[in-house]
Image: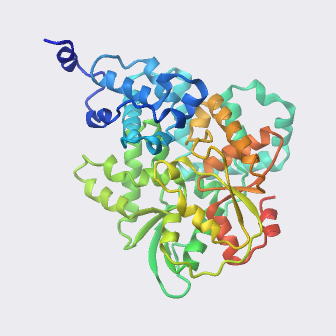
Amino acid sequence: MTASEQLAVLPSGFDAHHPPETELLRECVHCGFCLSSCPTYALWGNEMDSPRGRIHMMRAVSEGAMPLTENFQMHIDNCLGCMACMTACPSGVDYNKLLESTRAQIERNVPRTLLDKLYRRMLFATFPHPKRLKWMALPLRLYQWSGLQALVRGSGVLKLLPARLSSMEALMPHVLMHSGAMPQRVAAHGEVRLRVAIITGCVQSVFFSGVNAATVRVLAAEGCEVIIPKEQGCCGALMVHSGVEEEALEFARRLIAKFEGEPVDRIVINAAGCGSTLKEYGYMLRDDPDWAARAAAFAAKCVDLSEVLTELEPVAKRHPLAVKIAYHDACHLQHAQGIRKQPRELLQGIPELTLKEIPDAQMCCGSAGVYNLLQPEPADELGRRKVENLLSTGAEAVVSANPGCLLQLASGLRQRGMKMHSFHTVELLDASIRGVSVEELFKGRG
């Protein structure tokens, strides 16, 4: 028996439940086109912290040539999951599927330290649950509005905390009082051109409720009847990206059940990380006989907000917004979903708005779901690089389509002693359609 034949019969280091697919692993030809696009390879120059290096290790574990160890766990944990390698890859490797299945294997089979396990449980016990986030919002608002936050940050005491805890405080959103429940239906302005439902999200619905409100207004202004199912819950994106598979699938089933009774043409998402997961529901539930077809039907209707708005010929008048903005591509929009031109088309349709491109736009800002909370040191370095490139544009405001990116950029700017207004793409469209001035727009940000 040859060495290759012996290797072929070795038991896999992965368990039998959804291991990384052999066909997907073999698609990688290790050409190296992914290296220059990978954030962690850019930081450290370590082959095992590059996409092809990680795929090499996945294949070695799959073929029994390498054990599933804490060292393997470390290199997979280091990955941001930004999917820039998918844009760069000439072979079309589905790295997202490989990474998510590998992370689920790690969570089942490689023990974590007690502190790491407790910290991760705390994150997933709060962020995916809107009701719990609403309870957290009041003390956070008191912390900010009482002046205590400014005192704490000015004292330097945060430097004494573990990096993960100080990072959590640095990324805290500016908390406003919750705007209240959204209506379940909003009529289109004029003739109904499309009937859509929107995903309100978990963090988005509590800390960025203004983005959801702007989304509804813009869709209605463009002739969409908007359906907003109540008590939607989380889509499971944060868990999928972190390997918490069973909980993510349960969230997916609940959300599908919440929406599938609504006779709509599209299901609209305004957060990039959520959108990339929602579009994968069919794959995630592929071997569940009760849910596979339902998940595929749901996913087929899912579109990013910029996709549906560019699909419709604009009918709402745009008023001028004389502002210079830099557009930041969220990774799960540009790489995972392949959406780059649509947001730019929408922004360029606003009279007197100047759009500036951020250098090295394909590189992640370091947010990556909860990566900046789990791996704060590399996330901070990536954030600093992104902020330097952002400042080089001379823009007055930064615009993106993902709340995590905007929080990461705001934190990086604050570390530089600078402040720049930040907006979701739809907030500028909404302001232009409603005739809000730049002064009013900026004043609303404090």
Q: How many marks?
A: 0
The picture quadrant where one finds residue 94 is: top left
- Residue sitting nearer the eye, 422 or 166: 422
- Residue 231 drawn above or below residue 79: below
Residue 256 in sight = yes
Name the side, left or right, on which 27 lies relative to 224: left
Residue 133 percent across, percent down from the top left: 61, 49
Residue 394 percent across, percent down from the top left: 78, 52
- Residue sitting nearer the eye, 3 or 187: 3
- Residue sitting nearer the eye, 439 or 24: 24
- Residue 383 drawn above or below residue 78: below
- Residue 324 drawn above or below residue 385: below
Residue at 71% across / 44% down in the picture? Answer: 389
Residue 349 percent across, percent down from the top left: 63, 71
Q: Which quadrant holds the N terminus?
A: top left
The picture quadrant where one finds residue 381 is: top right
Residue at 56% across / 41% down in the picture? Answer: 368
The coloring applied to the image is rainbow
Residue at 18% across / 19% down in the picture? Answer: 9
Name the side, left or right, on which 308 lies relative to 317: left
Residue occupying the far left of the picture: 1
Residue 180 in sight = no
Residue 55 percent across, percent down from the top left: 39, 29
Residue occupying the far bottom of the picture: 190
Q: Which quadrant holds the C terminus?
A: bottom right
Residue at 71% across / 37% down in the picture? Answer: 384
